[in-house]
Amino acid sequence: MKINLKNNTGLKILSLVLAIALWYVIGNIDDPVTIDTYTIPVQIVNGDVLKSNDKAYEITEGENVTFTVRGKTSVLNKLKESDFRAEADLEKLSLVNSVPIDVTVSRYSSDVDITLGIVNTLKVNIENRVEAMLPVVVETEGVVGEGYDIGTKTSSPNMVEVAGSESMIHRLKEIRVVVNVNNAMEDINARQSVKFYDRNGDEVESSRIDCDTKLVNVLIDLWKTKEIPVIWKTEGTPAAGYGISAFDYEPKTVVIAATDEMINRITELNMEALPVANASSNVEKTISLDSSVLPQGVMLQEDTIDVVAKAVIEPRVADQVKLNKEDIEIKNLPEGKKVTFDKEIYEVEISTFRSKLGNVSGASLQPYIDIKELGNAAAGNVPIHLINPDGVTVSTTISAEIKVQ
């Protein structure tokens, strides 16, 4: 039996194969082979290769690449997206303007297999390379300290030269820098990075835009604020037989911001007079205020304010109003004395607006007499004084014969 066991080569080989298979099965049960999928951006290598011919490129396909990674679970669990890099070398640009995408991994490269998906090449359009000058727009975020507002915003430089593909450069509108001004109470000097924006207001990825200026110096002046009254008047006379029964406007005040030199000099905002000459109907006007209506060095705290005015134009009518003697106030009557009037009722001619006619009475004219106007006499004729309510005109003068006893 010993001789048979020593000479049975086939049995030995079978045992080895079974052992290897068993090891493989056990290994895969404990640490199986799995697949992970990643999508990462493709990095351009040798992107300047077209510059020498005044050409540039725009990516049409393959800006991002999706791929699978096959390997042991223990290995894949240690890998993350940042371990992978996808590159497209423009020196390998083909006649059909495509470049193969190469995906590499920085760790465990011998333990994993990488397979690209359907998109495995970067495709580009070759265009003329052009240059342009873009304005720098300074924007702010946050709210400045109480009692202050943002005055002037300047950048240095205020224009920046950019270059790139013709279609890309023609899309661009401006360069923006954003400065945080939250709780600021003094002028701000900052050095900010630039961002590119197209004509739709969308940010444009800057990796394919050549721009030597990546940072600009920004100065933001903070101005003190103050609330001032708005003054608006009418100008002219309405048509014959008509008058202004009411005039009002809103807002009555606005908040301005100004330089230190101007903040104390400006005390009110005078609007151009509302013309009512020869008007026989209501006159209304809305003015959108912006900083253009203010002196240099002064601005509104809000970008735009609508000031609305209305002059109510009505016909005037004449009428008679009766004054009861009980409505007449007696001023400077000596103590212990009394006054007798020659009439119970006095009449006065007035003119007013039709809408206000029902509100006018003898008492509303606040009639009074002054005993001092008799002098040393105990009786005589004294004028009846009237206080005209708004919009009411007294057309006649009246007096009363009185006795002081």
Image (cartoon, rainbow, N blue to C red):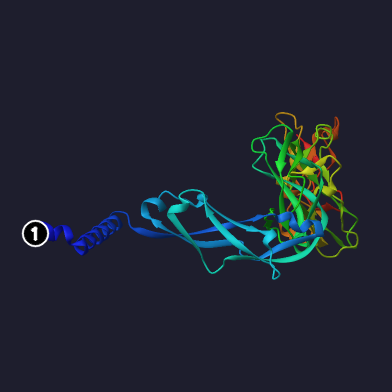
- The reply, left or right, for residue 16 in relation to residue 283 is left
Q: Is residue 183 left or right of residue 8?
A: right
Residue type at mark 1 is: Met
Q: Residue furthest bottom?
A: 96
Residue 105: horizontal and vertical position, in percent? 51, 52
Residue 166 picture location, percent across and down: 78, 63
SS label for mark 1: loop
Location of residue 42 (image quadrant): bottom right
Count of labels in the image: 1
Location of residue 38 with respect to 98 vertically, above or below: above
User: Which residue is at the front of the view, 288 or 252?
Assistant: 288
The N terminus, quarter of image: bottom left
Q: Label 1 belongs to which residue?
A: 1
Q: What is the x, y in percent for residue 373?
A: 85, 35
- Label 1 neighbourhood size at 10 Å, few (<14), some (14-19), many (20+)? few
Residue 19 position (above or below residue 364): below
Residue 151 placement: quadrant = top right
Quadrant location of the C terminus? Answer: top right
Residue found 16% across the figure and 57% down from its top = 6
Residue 85 appears left or right of 382: left
Query: In the displayed structure, does residue 124 sit left or right of residue 160?
Result: left
Foreground of the two, 225 or 89: 89
What x and y, as percent, mark residue 331? 76, 35
- Residue 120 in sight here: yes
Residue 384 in sight from this viewpoint:
no
Task: Give me the residue at 57% from left, 59% from top.
Answer: 102
The structure residue drawn at horizontal position 45% and vertical position 53%, both measured from the top left corner, is: 110
